[in-house]
Amino acid sequence: MRFSPVVLLSLVARATATILENGQERLNPYPGQADEVSLDGSWKQYANDAGEISYKGRWDSGFTSWWSVPGLKFGFTGDKLAVSFGKHTSDNVLVAYRVGGLDWEFSNVTADSAYQFVKPESSALEDTEYKDEKTFEMRVTNWVQISSVSVAADASLVKVPEHNKTIEVIGDSLASGQYATYEGLASWGFNFAAGLGNVEYTITAYPGICLTDKRCYGGDARGMKYQWSRASDVGDRANAAFGDSPEAWNFTAHRAADLVIINLGTNDEREQNNISGDEFYRNYVEMVEEVHKAWPDAQIVLMSLWGTFAKSGSTWVQRPIYGSEVKQVHEHFKEEGYVHYFDTSGILQHNDISPGGHPTDVGHLKIASHLMQWTKIKFDWEFSATGPEVQHDTTYWNNQESYKRWVASRRSM
Ligand SMILES: *[C@@H]1O[C@H](CO)[C@@H](O)[C@H](O)[C@H]1NC(C)=O
Ligand SMILES: *[C@@H]1O[C@H](CO)[C@@H](O)[C@H](O)[C@H]1NC(C)=O
Ligand SMILES: *[C@@H]1O[C@H](CO)[C@@H](O)[C@H](O)[C@H]1NC(C)=O
Ligand SMILES: *[C@@H]1O[C@H](CO)[C@@H](O)[C@H](O)[C@H]1NC(C)=O
């Protein structure tokens, strides 16, 4: 699900820092634009490999981020903070960042430059003291390379303890939020994992990718069955950097996932990829075996693929994809106890899918909310994000008096 006509629209939108909402320009789409800064003696610089900096998601050995919503997190003291981006940073890439549990702010950044995300006058510092340890978090919708992090010369970075649980979402454009307002930051994958609150998460998802190891779209060189074991994704940028020998992901150097959610197959099913149900089933079984081999204690959840919605007669009908195959994979592993099936039927309706074939922001939230509740019931995980913003820009409301009167007058008719 990639090279639909909407792709062009989104590339144009990115280049001009515009978010289109049903064709209308969103006002102030990226609150929080950071200024470029040149680092002088008033700063203390920490190299990208400083132990105080936690990298979330997948980064390669050169500190370049890959896949969906990779991030950085650390504590800092003082009243200013800057991040320097290396040469492998995409042009004007959108990053989301925040202090503590405050709302996400958005900024575009570019290669070979430093941006100041916290200033002495930043509202994020209200109600804090200079010497207090504040937390800084950044998530990247696309790709950056970190070269250093800087704070005031007399301040310091502090390592933030990690949450005890770890989630891995393995998916395609659906899990990575393609065409959603803030891309990865608006995806069900992010809303689910960040929504639970007390978990570390990695979203190994990339638009267009098949589960089967096949070139499914122009730029996507390999399928997930192969690429999951690599640090980088399958996009043009990764291919240009690594060709056919991408760096291996070192599973032993990173924490094992406790819970793995797989949503793959929507691209495999496309006619031009010619992947039969049998072939998909066999590959899916092997994929699950591979995940189990990497993380023997992980619970693995197979999501049914919601597919498409088509008008039929006087209503709309959901057409799931590989419905029986995903169930068969679950059946295959049932006895072993670590593979589970999450049925998405009935969560989305036809208008939760955008014209480009991906969930709307609301669609993403519906998937995430149901999956959160299911995870709570099934695995006894708690909801611990009880306040801080997860998905940005979803406060829609209507308090127009004229609307109320209209309702009242209709009622009285
Ligand atoms: C970066 O973001 C700012 C603020 O939204 C915007 O004015 C500017 O055009 C953006 N730059 C590019 C090249 O997109
Ligand atoms: C992780 O678990 C340990 C032991 O149960 C607990 O002391 C610690 O507070 C937990 N850490 C977080 C961040 O929840
Ligand atoms: C993977 O990480 C482990 C643990 O940090 C380390 O001992 C090992 O050398 C690494 N393997 C490779 C191939 O880098
Ligand atoms: C689709 O796959 C089948 C079985 O592998 C093969 O026989 C057929 O030629 C393929 N069709 C196309 C159009 O590639």
Image (cartoon, rainbow, N blue to C red):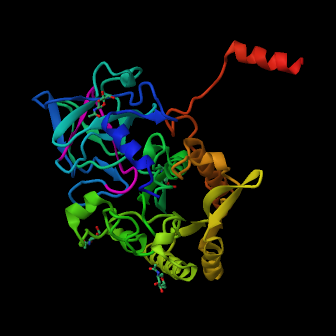
Q: Could one spot residue 346 in this view of the protein?
A: yes
As for residue 328 lying within the magenta part, the answer is no
In the image, farthest residue toward the right: 413
Instruction: Say which quarter of the image contains residue 57.
Output: bottom left
Res 117 → quadrant:
top left
Q: Which residues are magenta?
A: 66-86
Q: Is 23 situated above or below 251?
A: above
Residue in the picture at 22% in, 68% down: 243
Question: Where residue 27 sits in the image (x, y, percent)?
Answer: 44, 24
Using the rendered view, name the quadrant where residue 398 is placed: top right
User: Percent x, y for residue 109?
Assistant: 26, 38
Q: How many marks?
A: 0
> Is 85 inside the magenta-drawn segment?
yes
Q: Is residue 28 left or right of residue 401?
A: left
User: Picture coordinates of residue 380 (x, y %)?
Assistant: 65, 57
Rendered residue at 16%/48% (across/down): 87
* Residue 18: percent from left, percent from top: 38, 33
Question: Does residue 244 appear left or right of residue 302 in this picture?
Answer: left
**Is residue 211 visible in this depiction of the protein?**
no
Q: Which residue appears at 20% of the width and 61% of the height?
A: 241
Q: Is residue 340 left or right of residue 70?
A: right
Q: Nearer the viewer, residue 310 or 101?
A: 310
The quadrant where ligand 1 appears is: top left
**Foreground pick, 112 / 102:** 112
Q: Is residue 263 left or right of residue 49?
A: right
